């Protein structure tokens, strides 16, 4: 098995271990995210509506990347474009969010969390951050169209 597909298997196993611990995670993550970044608080106009989707789609992107799914590239373009409309988030903001998501899962899963899963999630988060950083330096889609 390649390192990437090993990561994917570990990540899936860790989500099973997390199980019901996922309940309420998005709400907790968003409260912490907004409190930690008061400069971006104005961008969160309707966090209760956005938080479940954002958390779920972040996990999907990391899992997709772990199996080198071809759709991940388009997904990154789409969410960067969407987020340009909210605030000028940096690659560090994305890295910080990924780190928060991973820590929250580890803590909530407790002893059930497979130890090797942490490395797998962090490796894929580093890869996703690199894709985000590359996309952020490209012109916005709307600017390219004119
Ligand atoms: C892989 C990373 C991310 C993904 C997949 C993602 C995805 C999403 C999705 C699906 C939404 C909801 C859109 C809607 O319902 O219309 C959203 C909203 C939002 N996201 Fe993200 N997001 C990511 C990272 C981030 C980061 C790092 C920040 C800032 C630190 C951020 C800030 C926001 C804001 C401000 C909103 C609007 C919230 C509101 O309306 O209250 N996102 N995101």
Image: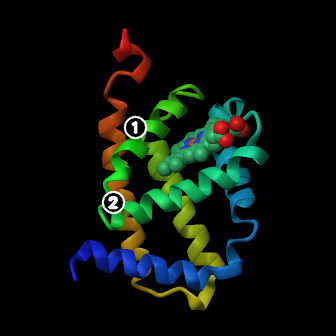
Q: Which mark is residue 69?
A: 2
Labels 1, 2: front one: 2
Q: Secondary structure at mark 1?
A: helix
Q: Where is 109 relative to 140, above or below?
A: below
| Residue 113 in picture, x, y percent from top left | 54, 85
Residue labelled with disc 1: 77
Please tell me in which quarter of the rendered image ligand 1 is found. top right
- Disc 1/disc 2 C-alpha distance (Å): 14 Å
Q: Residues within 10 Å of mark 1 (few under 14, many from 20)?
A: some
Colour option used: rainbow
Which residue is found at the position 76% from the left and 45% from the top? 49
Residue 134, picture quadrant? top left
Q: Where is 56 relative to 74, above or below?
A: below
Q: Secondary structure at mark 2?
A: loop
Residue 99 shows up from this direction: no
**Front-lying residue, 91 or 1:** 1
Residue 87 shows up from this direction: yes
């Amino acid at each position: 098995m390649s390192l990437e597909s090993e990561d994917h298997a570990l990540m899936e196993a860790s989500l099973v271990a997390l199980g019901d611990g996922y309940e309420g995670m998005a709400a907790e993550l968003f409260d912490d995210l907004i409190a930690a970044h008061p400069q971006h608080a104005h961008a969160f106009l309707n966090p209760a509506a956005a938080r479940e989707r954002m958390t779920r789609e972040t996990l999907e992107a990391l899992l997709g990347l772990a199996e080198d799914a071809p759709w991940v590239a388009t997904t990154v373009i789409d969410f960067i474009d969407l987020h340009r409309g909210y605030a000028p988030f940096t690659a560090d903001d994305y890295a910080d969010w990924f780190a928060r998501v991973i820590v929250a899962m580890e803590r909530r899963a407790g002893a059930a969390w497979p130890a090797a899963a942490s490395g797998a999630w962090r490796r894929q988060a580093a890869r996703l951050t690199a894709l985000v950083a590359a996309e952020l330096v490209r012109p916005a889609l709307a600017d390219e169209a004119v």
